[in-house]
Amino acid sequence: METFEEIIKGEKPVLVDFFATWCGPCKAMSPVVDALGKEVQGKARVLKIDIDKNEPFAMQYRIQSVPTFMIFSKGESVWRASGVIDKATLLSELEKYY
C-alpha cells in the first residue's frame, strides 16, 4: 500500500481534502469531492484525510479549520484553501497541474 508521501510525490497532482466527520461543511463537500475524484480519474488523484484519525498530518500541514483543501504537485504544496468550495473551482485549480 502506498504511503501519503509516495502519493503526493507521484507524477499525478493530488487534491487532499482534510476533513472531520463532525464538520457540517465537510459533509456538504463530501459528494463534491467524490464526484471530482471520478471526473479526474487517470489525470489526478483525490485523497480524503480525517484529521481526527490522522493527527500527525493535520499538525504537519497546520490544518486549523476544516475542510481544508491542498493540491500537491510532485511533492510540493502548490495550492491551499479552506471552507466550502465549488467543484468548478477545485477542478480548475487541479487542472493547472496535469
Image (tube, helix red, strand yellow):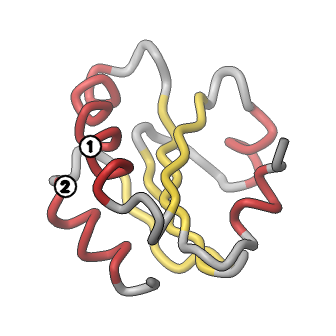
Residue 20: x percent and y percent?
49, 24
Which residue position holds label 1? 35
Amino acid type of disc 1? Ala
Q: Residue at x 58, y 74 (%)?
A: 12
Residue 2: x percent and y percent?
82, 49
Residue 32: x percent and y percent?
24, 41
Q: Residue at x 66, y 79 (%)?
A: 11
Q: Residue at x 46, y 16 (%)?
A: 21
CA–CA distance in space, label 2 to label 1: 8 Å
Amino acid type of disc 2? Lys
Q: Residue at x 83, y 49 (%)?
A: 3
SS at badge 2? helix
SS at badge 1? helix
Q: Which mark is residue 87?
A: 2
Q: Residue furthest front?
A: 42
User: Which residue is more in the foreground, 76 or 59?
Assistant: 76
Quadrant location of residue 80? bottom left
Quadrant location of residue 57? top right
